[in-house]
Amino acid sequence: MKSVSLATYLAVKEVIRNRGRFLLVALVIALITLLVLFIAALGEGLATGNRQYVANLDAQLIVFLEKSDYVITASRLETKTVKSIRRVKGVDDAGAIYTSNTEIVSLAEPLKVSMLGVEPGRPGMPTILEGREFRTGEARETVIDRNVALRSGIQVGDLIEIRSTQGTEDEFFELEVVGLVDGQSYFFQPTIFVPPATWEKIRPQSESELTSDTPFPSIIAVRLVEPSQTDVMSALLMEKVSNIEVTDIETTINNIPGYSAQQGTVQTQGIFTLLIGILVIGGFFQIQILQKVPQIGVLKAIGASNGVVGLSAVMQIILVTALGVGIGGGLTYLFSLGFPPTIPLTFNGERSLIAVILLLLIGPFGGMVSIIYAVRIEPLKALRLG
Amino acid sequence: MSNVALEVRDLVKSFSLDGATIQAVDHVSFQVKSGEFVALVGPSGSGKTTMLSILAALLTPTSGQVLIDGQDLAQMNEKQRVKLRREKIGFTFQSNNLIPYLSARENVEFMLRLNGNLDRAARLRSDELLARLGLAERLHNLPAQMSGGQQQRVAIARALIHNPAVVLADEPTASLDTERAFQVVETFANLIHENERAGIIVTHDLRMCQFVDRVLQMQDGKLVRIYEDKKEILELARGTIH
C-alpha cells in the first residue's frame, strides 16, 4: 500500500510538473484514439449499411436458388417456391423478397435507394413505426426506411417519384409514402419497400424482361416454428423443395458481395493503428526512461524499491494513456456531430468499448519495455559510481 | 561521540579485468562513531569511491564485514539492503542529486515519505532544516531554479532529515566554486556534529579536510594513513602535508 501511494505521488508530481511534455504525448494518443474510434465506427457503419435489412429479418433461414453460393444477387427463385416452402412442416411462415435498385428523383438531389419487393405481413416486411403497410396488388404505395427519411426529409403522406431504366428508356413512377420503418439499409443504400406486383412493374429491367409480368424473388425469408431448429429445418427444406439451397442469416450476411473483404480491411486498418499506437507510446516512454536513468539511480540509492520505481512508471503510462483516450473520445464525439448522414459512421457501443479498452491496454503494453528497463537500472551504474 | 555507527572489518573488494584481478579495496578496517565527521581522501583509482559504494550497500564486498548501526551488510538480502539504505543511510552525490520534478521541500520530505514518517512535526523539522541551510525562501523552487550550491544544501537536508546512522557524501563540492564548496562542507560538518550522525565525505579536494575530525587516506586500495590530530589535519588542508 505504501509502495502504491509513493508510486502515485511520484507519477502524478512528474506529470503535473512536466505537463507540457505529457500533454503532447496524450494528444498523440488522442489522435490515435480518434483514428481507431473512427475506423471502428466506419467498420460498423459499412457493416450496417450492408447487412442491416438482412440482420433485422424476422426469420431464421434464407432460401436461395441452388448453386447460387448463398449470394443474393446470384439467386433467382421460381414464384411457386415460396408456396412449397410454406407447406413444409415446421415452417411458421415464409416471405419472398425481390431486390433491385432505383433512384428517387423528386428531390433537390436524387437519392439512390435499394428497392425491395416484400409481402405485407410476411417475413421480409419490417415492422411499421409510423403510418401503415402498403396494400397488395399493384398499389403505387411504398414504405420507406428511416435512413431515407433522414437523408431526404420525405415524410409519410408525401408523393415521391422514382426513375427506372426499362429497356432503353427512362421511366418515371409516382409512389405514395404510406409508412415508415426503422433503418433497413441494404447494399450500402437506404431502402424503400413496395408490393411484389408493383416492384415487377417499376423495377429497372432489360428489354427481354419487359415481356414478363411475373416477379421472380431473389430469396425467401423463412420463419420457423422452432427458431432453434435451423440445421434440421435447413436439411428438411432442401429435401422437400427442389432447386434450392438454404442457410442461416449469418452466412447470408457474410456472403453479401464484398462484406467479408470490407470488414477484414477495416479490421486490419484498426489493428495497424493500434500497433502504431503501441510503437509511439513505447518509443516515447523508452526515451523518457533513458533520460531519467540518473534520477532513477538516485531514487534507488536513497531506498526506493524496484516496486515503487516500476509502479510509478506504470501509473504514469496509465495516466497519460487514459488522458489521451479521454481527449480522443471527446474529440470523436464532437467530430461525429458534424458528419453528414451520407458518411457511413455508426458508433456502436460494443465496438467503441472494445476499441477504448484496447487503447487503454496499448499504453502499458507499449511501455512494458521501458518499465522493465527502469526496474533493471542499477543505482551504482546510474550514478556512475561503479 | 561515543557509539560506533559504522565499522569496517578487513574489507576486500576485487574485480576481474581482462583476466587480471584488481584489488580495489585491500584489507581495509576502520570505525566511525556517531557525531564524527571523517574524510576519505586519495588520488583517482585509490579505491575511495568503491569503498563508499560498499558502505552505501550498493556494492557487495568480496570479503570482510561492514556493520552499520550494528547490522552486518553481508548477512542481508537485496530487500533488506534497500530498507537499510532507506532508514540508516543518508546520501549526497556529486550531481543529479535531486528529483528534478520535486521542489526543495518535496525532495527533503520524500525521504520521510519513503520511511512512512511524514507527519506535521516531520514537515516542520524539514522546513526548519532547510531554513537552517539558508533555503527558507527556496522551499517551493524546483532544482532547475536553484544554484548548484543550493541544490547540494537541499541534498544535505535530504540526507539528514530521517536521522540516519550514517551520512555519506560523494564529492559533494565537485561542481561548486571554492567559496560555495567551503560553505557547503562547513554546514555539513556542523549538522553532522549537532545531530550526532556519523559522516563520511569522499573528496579529492584536501582543503575540505579542515572541517573534518579525521582523515582516512587511501592509496591503491589500501588505507595508508589516518590523520587524527587536528593540527595535522589543518596542515593537510593547507597543503603543507602531501
Image (cartoon, coloured by chain):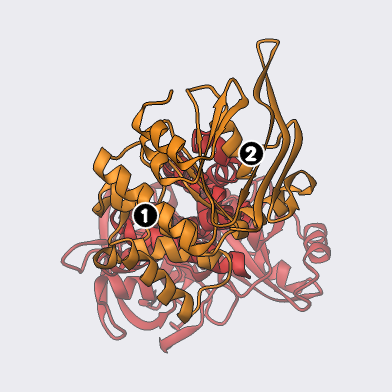
Chain colours: A red, B orange
- Which numbered disc, 2 or 1, marks the residue closer to the eye? 1
Q: In the rendered image, which quarter is residue A219 located in?
A: bottom right
**Disc 2 element:** helix
Task: Farthest residue to the bottom: give it.
Answer: A131
Task: Farthest residue to the left: give it.
Answer: A108
Q: Is residue B226 above or below residue A231?
A: above
Quickly name the residue at label 2. B54
Residue A161 in picture, x, y percent from top left = 25, 69
**Closest to the observer, A11 or A153:** A11
**Disc 1 element:** helix
- Please give the label number shown on residue B187: 1
Residue B211 in picture, x, y percent from top left = 40, 46
Q: How crowded is mark 1: few (under 14 residues within 10 Å), some or many (20 or more)?
A: some
Residue at x 25%, y 49% (from the top left corner): B147
Residue at x 34%, y 65% (from the top left corner): B132
Residue at x 34%, y 68% (from the top left corner): A330
Rounded to the nearest angstrom, the CA distance separating label 2 from label 1 is 25 Å
| Same-chain status of marks 2 and 1 | yes
Q: Which amino acid lies under the numbered mark 2 shown in the image of this protein?
A: Ile
Residue B19 visible at all? yes
Residues at circles 2 and 1 in contact by the CB criterion of under 8 Å? no
Residue B74 in picture, x, y percent from top left = 77, 43
The C terminus of chain A sits in image quarter: top right
Q: In this view, does B108 lie above or below A147?
A: above
Q: Is residue A368 above or below residue A308?
A: above
Residue at x 48%, y 23% (from the top left corner): B44
**Closest to the observer, A192 or A169:** A192
